[in-house]
Image (cartoon, grey):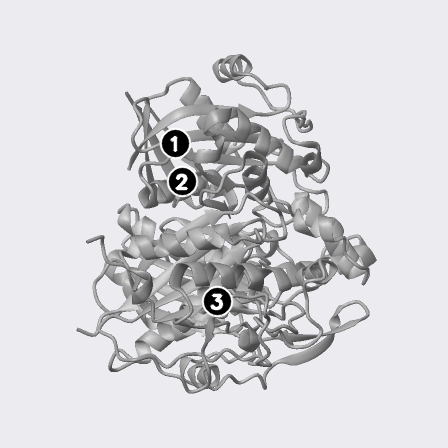
Amino acid sequence: MSAPCRLAAMGMVHALGDAAGPIAERLLAGDQSRLQSRSDLVPDRSLVVAAVREPLPDIPEALSPYACRNNAMALASLTPIEGPLREAVERFGAERVGVIMGTSTSGVSDAEDAIRHHQETRRLAPSFDYAQLEFGGIADFVARWVGAEGPAYTLSTACSSGARALASARSLLRLGLCDAVVAGAADTLCGLTLGGFSALQAVSADVTNPMSRNRQGLTLGEGAAMFLVVQEEGGVQLSGVGESSEAHHMSAPDPEGRGAIASMAGALHDAGAEPADVTYVNLHGTGTPLNDVMESLAVDAVVGREVPCSSTKPLVGHTLGAAGAIEAAFAWLILDRSTDGALELPPHVWDGERDPELAPLRLASAGERSAPATRPRVLSNSFGFGGNNCSLLLERSFS
Amino acid sequence: MKVTVRHATAWAPGLETAEAWQAWADEPKALPTEGLPDARFLPAMLRRRCTPLSKILLRAAMDGCPEADRANLRTVFSSRHGSINESVGLLENVARAEKLSPAKFSHTVHNAQAGLYSIATGNRCASSSLAAREDSFGCGLLEALCHLEREPQRDVLFVSGDVPLDPVFAPLVDEPATPHAVALRLSGTAKGPALTAAIEPNRGEAPVPPWPAAVEFLRQWLRETPSFELVTPRHRWRFERSG
């Protein structure tokens, strides 16, 4: 048996809300009512986005150099678990608590304003600090806010960043370098990523429609999810990590899905689980033509056509660097809510028109529950730009 | 945790061979602030869009292990600034409400070098890219150890480096600005000189070093110093060499 890895506390924020209770209700109902159409983000284009609707908390005055929207996003997801985080620092000592964050945007939305100011005045906006923009800044911010003095770094591997943060948190614990790790990810809607993905023709004008014959690309979102990770038995366990690189193309996946297969199979192998042990798969499910072809092939090859799957991106958008953490948080939520080992499954929200080119996966419908199991397991996929894949397996024992 | 350093190599302007680095380690002097490696080791298709940082990190990565092994290692790329210089142009486009170039956008992701390395060498192993302000080198080493924890039998190629920051942001960061990359091939199983790293909070001062942390690490390693420290605003990193 490998060492346990408990995801002891979880907080999150995204289009579905900033508190676990309402988020769970909207997630399980497949609520798309909080998506918005915005025309201020990309020149000459109106797009559906999944923005956070609640006001974000203020960054404390003592940490004002870090005051940017992305760090406020991180703070919104840390606030609900502030108690357990501070207890961990107290219990283990600040030096033994590490921080691993994921992000793909960092504070780019604030840097856009700073650069605009620079173009007008030849000076950066006075509120701008480089710590808002550099990728390492968010880990430094979270460490200072929590009072953690162990290692603090930010993984940025595009859309797999958030999943990787959890994988490395587990490794730091197993190496004995930390006794607790604050792990998670945050990403913010900004002109740079919206403009960039639009330029790559990856963004859908309407709400993303994954696995449909009518899919036209992704809906971008923003959000954050944070976990307290400790080496303890019980609760929700991170039992499997699988990873791969694609060696294929900077912005397109291998059409045969070899990287995705290696990633999913790796997570199962790491957890000592069989394909039949998987209760539910949270798909990467971006709704781009290429992702869904290769992912449906890969899921079919690894767990087959009977396991219920869904993409939660039609509800919270593709939150890029935060997606792996947010989707792990959904897995955590349904495992945590269960009282009998049966899981309430997030529905796959789409137009219901199957694409004959895709492997026919079993897509979860609204109100669906899995059969009670002694050890339900959720597999969560994150496949990043640049060919960087990471799959996580989360489980909980009901024996 | 103890790890074997199978190979240590680096690139900086004018320091392109093992002999040049050994001579510099024995008698170090300030490093140049400009320069780029010849990138003909990369296929033309990939080279065309390569940023200066990608050329430097990939050059160190290729020098860091023999061709036959390049596809069979896990990789970790660490850079404080990553592709922020290229993002400046895109941010200016955004500020002027101009359309973005898709190819330029693709090359500003922080894992661009990891993606390019994987494509150029056919490497399908796990890879991470990270940043940690002044601790980017030390934390990169920890991330490499994380990969060895997940797969002890497979070596990790750890590459850490940066280029001087764009003039728009450079005044905000006090650091030795030199283009550089250091590559370490790390193994949990091979015989050879072993490295132990320990980390503790720094509650004192951290003067700006004369050259980047990665280069200082390499200098001490090439001099076979048995025990040395890197001090950053956040941490004191203690390294010990044995065997």
Could you give the CA–CA distance between mark 1 and mark 3, rounded to whole angstroms? Answer: 34 Å
Q: Are marks 2 and 1 on the same chain?
A: yes
Q: What type is the residue that disc 3 sits on?
A: Leu
Q: What type is the residue that disc 1 sits on?
A: Leu
Instruction: Give the image quarter of residue A255.
Output: bottom right
The local crowd at label 1, few if under 14, some if 14 to 19, many if 20 or more residues have their Cα within 10 Å, is many
Residue A328 image offset from top left, x and y in percent: 41, 66
The answer to whether the residues at label 3 and label 2 have Cβ atoms under 8 Å apart is: no
Q: Is residue B242 visible to the viewer in this orientation of the structure?
A: yes
Residue B192 image offset from top left, x and y in percent: 32, 22
Above or below for A348 versus A94: below
Residue A308 image offset from top left, x and y in percent: 41, 74
The answer to whether the residues at label 2 and label 1 have Cβ atoms under 8 Å apart is: yes
Residue at 57% across, 66% down: A286
The secondary element bearing badge 3 is classed as loop
The answer to whether the residues at label 1 and label 3 have Cβ atoms under 8 Å apart is: no
Most distant residue in the front direction: A356
Residue at 55% across, 49% down: A387
Instruction: Quickly name the residue at label 2.
Output: B144
Instruction: Quickly name the residue at label 3.
Output: A283
Quadrant (top left/top right/bottom left/bottom right) for the N terminus of chain B: top left
The secondary element bearing badge 1 is classed as strand
Residue A7 image offset from top left, x and y in percent: 32, 65
Q: Is residue A78 visible to the viewer in this orientation of the structure?
A: no
Instruction: Quickly name the residue at label 1.
Output: B186
Q: What type is the residue that disc 2 sits on?
A: Ala
Subunit of label 1: B
Dot in front, 1 or 3: 3
Could you give the CA–CA distance between mark 3 and mark 2, rounded to whole angstroms? Answer: 28 Å
Side of A386 where B104 appears, left or right: right
The local crowd at label 3, few if under 14, some if 14 to 19, many if 20 or more residues have their Cα within 10 Å, is many
Counting residues from the start of the chain, the first of labels 2 and 1 encountered is: 2
